[in-house]
Amino acid sequence: MKEEQRLLILQSSSLFAPPEGVKLSYGTAGFRADASILKSTVHRVGILTALRSLKTRSVVGLMITASHNKVTDNGVKIVDPSGGMLSQEWEPFADQLANAETPEALLSLITEFIEKEKISFDGVRTAEILLGRDTRPSGESLLKAAKQGISSIFGAMALDLGILTTPQLHWMVRARNKSMAATEPAYFEQISSSFRCLVDLIPNETKSSKMDNRVVVDGADGVGGEKLEVLKNMLTGLVIEVRNTGKGGGLLNDGVGADYVQKEKVVPRGFGSNDVGIRCASLDGDADRIVYFKVPDNSSSRIDLVDGDKMLSLFALFIKEQLSILTKAGNENPNNNSQARLGVVQTAYANGASTDYLKQLGLEVIFTPTGVKHLHEKAAQFDIGIYFEANGHGTILFSESWLSWLEARNNELSLVSEGSEQQKAALRLLSVSKLINQAVGDALSSLLLVEAILQHKGWSIDDWNKLYQDLPSRQLKVKVVDRTAVTTTNAETIAVSPPGIQEAIDAEIAKYPKGRCFIRPSGTEDVIRVYAEASTQEAADSLADSVAKIVDRFLGFGSSEQ
Ligand code: 16G
Ligand code: MG
């Protein structure tokens, strides 16, 4: 590294002292903390993205958001050239950089790392980073810190794309690296036009049924609500009413948003007895998650939740139906080799009833640990891989090779049997691949796909919700002395340490019919999470309660005093 470069890094980072006594970790999805302590972290992540761009010789992204966390928090994460999450191999380095105590320590870490990774600073190569942020008030000053970090690396350029949803930035990084237009209008155009295609292909039988084409969406008072206000005007055949757009003075994620609705199972702010029976949905603070819900009656604030598992099931059903139309017997064409490998990916939080339903559809179901990066990686191994977390984050990935086959098949069908059922199925699948975000879970594109499929089937939210009935479940969290004392295996379903805890949990589970329970350390909060399922709500509550007590006995504050 040239002396001028060393000096520039030292000088730039001396302006950003890291917070004292706080250890930050890249965690499940980037650094997150109270916004007031994040400047130095974001500055260093700016440096890291420049290195990532140099290493991959591609455009990368940097997003400033803390998703569903409270408004005073903020966070930062990196988007890899594919549009996916930062490669896990680089996470430990991100942790080291964020926690370096002095500019000198930071510089020596960088020097070591660029040697190890063989990143050349030849001055010829340039780095390019797309920047986005959500609507948090702290976003602007953090973005400035990121830009300063980036410009401390020679040849690195930042392109500020302003306020975006997290999935929009992922989409744009991916588009940019494929030499496609990477702008917000291009994003809106692609998802609205593919939605239009799906609506145009609705079978006549259901087209004539009087389907309710209105959905009311809670925007969490964040960036998603703002963007949906723009997108909705580009759609025909669907009426979207957005509440909690962030413009009415409501506080981001405060009693609103997908995380709140899914965890608390109550109506978000701005919804109530006037909404009984209406199809509603809720986005999270950066619009990478969505859940649906219905207010069943006006006697309480309770909702009927239609979560990520139900979305996964609806998507899987639709894709499977279209695939079977496309490949239906009687077509002897030797090129009709379309036996797509369709797979679904879930985590241990998926309701057991959803897994049974998917298996009964004949699908391959795979489990991974929590966190989008794990699910995404597995889904990418299929021709069509659908993944969802129960919390509403997920998408459908189509492999490049299967998509090329599908394009070719569609062209062929349009010559020999234009307008046939088979060709319509091919077109529908192509439209889904353009509508649903190929980079990451995206609440806006998931919303439009759900709406298109419900219209296709002529289904109400109740018809959809009836695909299967959720097993009663309960989630709890337990504060412990050291959450890293819990390690797990088998997609987080078995606790390996501390010794003896799994046996104690198993003994509890055995007391409940259809009982299932697991514990895991949270990746975003300093707690151990407990998830329990059983045949009745009382049983699920009681199982979760007993296991929480076990966790407390093994690891709680009382346990450390002995
Ligand atoms: C993050 C993850 C989400 C996961 C959640 C678990 C991404 C983009 N987001 O929000 O997938 O479900 O963390 O939180 O990966 P927990 O570890 O606190 O339970
Ligand atoms: Mg989010």
Image (cartoon, helix red, strand yellow):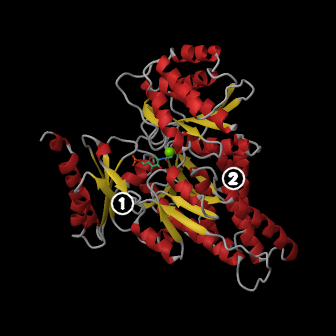
Q: Which is nearer the eye, 104 or 32?
A: 104
- Answer with the quarter of the image where residue 212 lies: bottom right
Residue 368, above or below 107: below
Pointer 2 local density, CA inside 10 Å: few below 14, some 14–19, many at least 20: many
Mark number, residue 59? none
Q: Which is nearer the eye, 439 or 106?
A: 106
Mark number, residue 493? 1
- Answer with the quarter of the image where residue 480 lies: top left
Residue 217 in sight here: yes
Mark number, residue 191? 2
Q: What element carries label 2?
A: helix
Q: Is residue 308 left or right of residue 486?
A: right
Who's the residue at 55% across and 54% down the image?
A: 376
Who's the residue at 21% across and 65% down the image?
A: 507
Q: Which is nearer the eye, 216 or 456?
A: 456
| Disc 1 to disc 2, C-alpha distance | 37 Å
Callout 1, which amino acid?
A: Thr
> Residue 423: image x %, image y %?
77, 72
Callout 2, which amino acid?
A: Ile
- The quarter of the picture where the C terminus appears is top left
Considering every residue shown, the one lying at the far right of the view is 415
